[in-house]
Amino acid sequence: MASPSTLEEGTGPRARRPLAEINVTPLVDVMLVLLIISLIAAPMLQRGVPLELPAAETARDIQDSRIVVSIDRDLRIFINDRPVHYELLEERMRAVAAALPGEIVYVRADRLLPYGEVLLVMDRIRKAGVQRIALVTTPLPREKRG
């Protein structure tokens, strides 16, 4: 016959063992919340001001673009996707020219903008001391190439 000390809870043959299973319900809840957040945030991470760029047969990919000035159809100006008032453009570009001498400033302009409007923005950039300015285009579709 077993002694009373061996029948106590945790010492005999019917002793309770700790559960080795992991409750995955909280993990699934956290993963679903992260999935929903990423689905909502993904469209906001789209880079660039939405523009319809002009097409050119000689268009090439830009490898290193630190400074991009965009002009949309409503003549709003953006520096690296941040809106800038037209009057402050020259001041901001002056700071860029001082901090990054020799840097190329890429100008993205909507294809429906009048040439003169794009030229005025480029002139302000050049007056600020930026010497290298490049226009951004998209590749011409294959069926339209001559």
Image (tube, grey):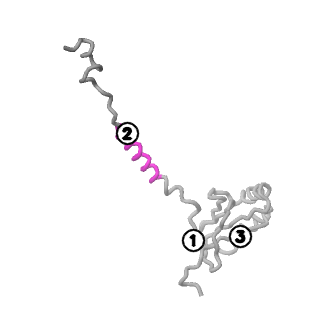
**Could you say whether the residue bearing mark 1 is in a helix, strand or loop?**
loop
Drawn side of residue 44 relative to residue 3, left or right: right
- Does the residue at mark 2 contact the one at mark 3 (Cβ under 8 Å)? no
Placement of 102 over or under 35, stated as above or below = below
The structure residue drawn at horizontal position 19% and vertical position 14%, both measured from the top left corner, is: 1
Drawn side of residue 2 relative to residue 90, left or right: left
What residue span does the magenta drawing correspond to? 22-40
- Residue 33 placement (x, y as % from top left): 41, 45
- Does the residue at mark 1 contact the one at mark 2 (Cβ under 8 Å)? no
Residue 17, picture quadrant: top left
**Could you say whether the residue bearing mark 3 is in a helix, strand or loop?**
strand
The structure residue drawn at horizontal position 34% and vertical position 34%, both measured from the top left corner, is: 20
Residue under label 2: 26
Q: CA distance from mark 2 to mark 3?
A: 52 Å
Drawn side of residue 79 relative to residue 93, left or right: left
- Residue 7 placement (x, y as % from top left): 24, 16
N-term mark: 2 or 3: 2
Residue under label 1: 52
What amino acid is at disc 1? Glu
Residue under label 3: 134
Question: In the image shown, does 61 or 49 lie closer to the viewer?
Answer: 61
What amino acid is at disc 3? Ala
